[in-house]
Image (tube, rainbow, N blue to C red):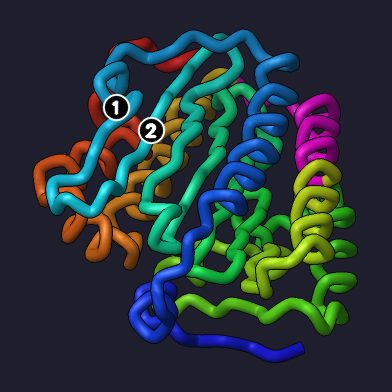
Amino acid sequence: MPKSTRSLIDEMEARPAIDNRATFDTLWGVLRELFEKVSARFELQADPSTADLQPYQSIDGSGAGGSLSTFAGPEIDWLVFSWVGNPKAGFSNMHLTVSLSAKFDAPNLGLAFGTAPDLFWYMDFIPRKDLAANPQYMDKYYHELNEEHLRLQDDSNLTSFISRSLYMRVTQTAASLCFTAPDNPENMRTLRDTSQKLVDQWLANVEKSAIVPEDERPAQAARDEHVRRQIALRDPMNAMVEGMYGKQLTMKLADALWGGGRVLPRPQ
């Protein structure tokens, strides 16, 4: 399989603008289906802190926009359902990330789709423990994800995307799915089918999750929030977003991704 270490910003700057609105609509439809699947399993309440981000607009006159919704609930610490970009000019980035309540030890869920201007996707089960030090945890929750990882490594239509950010690579598991691919129906089917399968598996992980002792939950909740915050603040795409939306809005978006301005209480 080919590999790419070019940043998504480099990809955008090296390519002419492409109207990707139809692809954006398809991707957003897939992500919405996954959000609805998660919503059917968990009780969710919208957090008021992001009510003014549905939607928002850029300051550069390009027509770029976005929407960011956040949720919490009795079994969900923080859920983000969002998109940002300018699909008419080829760039879009959308997220469904779910941090479970600290009572579960099952991994959290991370999904990102986009166009830059080719298809891009990242899918992973974000661990709550060090996998190398906890191999039984890895065996319990990561077998199916690893099978998908190995299967897609043999797909000649996909290019393995390797982030230039060391921190972003550190936060990915060895079984994560992170690819770019030409925008065509076959690759879109791969993205849709794989993401549906992995969300089903993640929900199955929740059902078989061990319950964390109450005295250990504060440390797990703090770790989850710390990792979310670092990912949001260190994301290399923040530079592009700041150019489109300004520093103040970019920081507000980053804070929303990790729950910095949350209003709803954290679950126990």
Q: How many numbered marks are there?
A: 2
Does 100 sit left or right of 117 as displayed? right
The reply to whether the C-beta atoms of the residues labelled 2 and 1 are less than 8 Å apart is yes
Numbered mark located on residue 164 in the image: none
Above or below 65: residue 151: below
Does 255 sit left or right of 77 as displayed? left
Which residue occupies 48% across, 17% down?
72
Badge 2 is on which residue?
67
Name the spot of residue 44 as percent of width and height, x first. 56, 11
> Residue at the bottom extreme?
2
Residue 20 lies in the magenta-colored region: no
**Main SS category, magenta section:** helix
Which residue occupies 60% across, 48% down?
111
Which residue occupies 39% across, 61% down?
89
- Residue type at mark 1 is Leu
Q: Observer-nearest residue: 217 or 101?
A: 101
Which residue occupies 28% across, 44% down?
254
Above or below 222: residue 229: below
Q: Which residues are magenta?
A: 198-213
Q: Secondary structure at mark 1?
A: helix
Q: Secondary structure at mark 2?
A: strand
Name the spot of residue 28 as percent of width and height, x first. 59, 40
Name the spot of residue 227 as percent of width and height, x first. 41, 49
Badge 1 is on which residue?
53
- Residue type at mark 2 is Ser
Residues packed near mark 2 inside 10 Å, few (<14), some (14 to 19) or many (20 plus)? some
